[in-house]
Image (cartoon, rainbow, N blue to C red):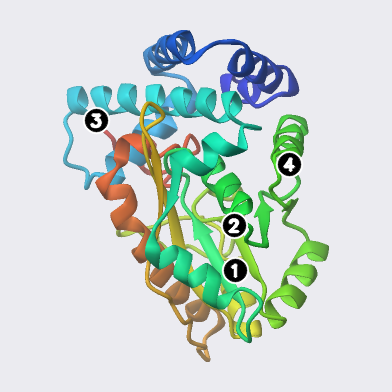
Amino acid sequence: MPSLQSLINSPLGIGLILGIGKALPPRWGFKLADRMGTRLAEMKDSPMVRATRANLWIATGKKLSSRELDELVLDNLQFTANSLYDFYHHINDHDVIRKRVTLSPKLREYLETRIGKNEGTIMLAPHLSNFDLGGRAIALNGYDVLALSYPLPPGGYQWQNQLRRDAGINIKPMSVQTLRESKDRLKNGGAILTGLERPLPETNYYPRFFGHPAPVPVSYVRLALQTKSAVFVVACTGTPQTDYKLECSDLIYLKPDDDPVKEIEKNAELVLKAAEPFIRDNPEQWSMTYPVWPFALDEMPK
């Protein structure tokens, strides 16, 4: 029997969410999203909810009681459902997106002074707030950025990527071919954007994230070192009922190391460390429903 998560991310699930998002006005769309988030939070034994709970426990310093964690998971899943509704409701409304998603002065400066210049730029985005709408806003503001998505996406994710392309986001799944394309782009002063922290099913590298080893993506490290590109974290914060803001960290320059494992993990930790404050300050907005720290599934408060 397929899991709840696989059903939500299937073509049927994505199609249903898209249909609801386009059809319902905000007054009813947000109410329905709240109910869906509440229903999901009640399914405490589902892998999706357990992963969300474990991730939030670690990100909040393992300080929350079981009751406090229940409340945060509810807020988090309601927020995620509201963000999905908001994204699909406004997916093709260019004027609304430009108005509601503000790029911080620092981010705008980086994009305007770096893209197309002598040095490549790699942006790493945690799954915060309405990160998809944030990516759409970058494209609508005229910045030429290649987005790299999770490798070998199943059917539902392929449809999501197509919807993102239809909405103006230049997105391609991570592969050997797209990594070559990314390398060429970076060597010519271009920019790429990719997700920061969705865990990998198999990896040889476990950089520390919130103080614990995590099987998160690290391919950007070698890409940055090979092309001498700068790296920074870009994070979307804000609520579906108000407005969003895209903020960023300072530029990060990665350093080579004679030890190949240390080279990957230590540099990845510099980037992950820069992302932690955005998540720590907005845990209810962190939409990560896969276990970043598998050990926490057994150690978190029941």
Q: Name the secondary structure under disc 4.
A: loop
Q: What is the spatial separation of the Cα atoms under label 4 and label 3, in whole angstroms?
A: 32 Å
First in residue order: circle 2 vs circle 1:
2
CA gap between label 2 and label 3 equals 32 Å
Q: Amino acid at mark 2?
A: Thr
Q: Which residue is rendered at x = 40% and y = 41% of the image? A: 244
The residue under label 4 is 153
For the residue pair 270 and 296, the one nearer the viewer reads as 270
Mark 1 sits on what residue?
Answer: 220
- Return the disc, 4 or 1, that comes first in the chain's sequence: 4
The residue indicated by pointer 3 is 301
- Quadrant for the N terminus, please: top right
Q: Locate residue 183, reporting x and y percent.
A: 73, 75
Residue of label 2: 194
Q: Position of residue 260 (x, y in %)?
A: 56, 82
- CB atoms at circles 2 and 3 under 8 Å apart? no
| Tag 3–tag 1 contact (CB < 8 Å) | no
Residue found farthest to the bottom: 258
Give the Cα separation between the discs numbered 4 and 2. Answer: 14 Å
Mark 2 in CB contact with mark 1 (< 8 angstroms): yes
Left/right placement of residue 196 relative to residue 244 reads right
Residues at circles 4 and 1 in contact by the CB criterion of under 8 Å: no
- Examine the rendering and report whether any part of residue 41 can be seen: yes
Badge 3 amino acid: Pro
Label 3: element kind = loop
Side (left or right) of 302 relative to 261: left
Judge whether 64 appears above or below 202 on screen.
Answer: above
Label 4 CA crowd tier, 10 Å (few <14, some 14–19, many 20+) = some
Q: Is residue 138 above or below residue 77?
A: below
Q: Amino acid at mark 1?
A: Tyr
- At x 42%, y 39%, the residue is 129
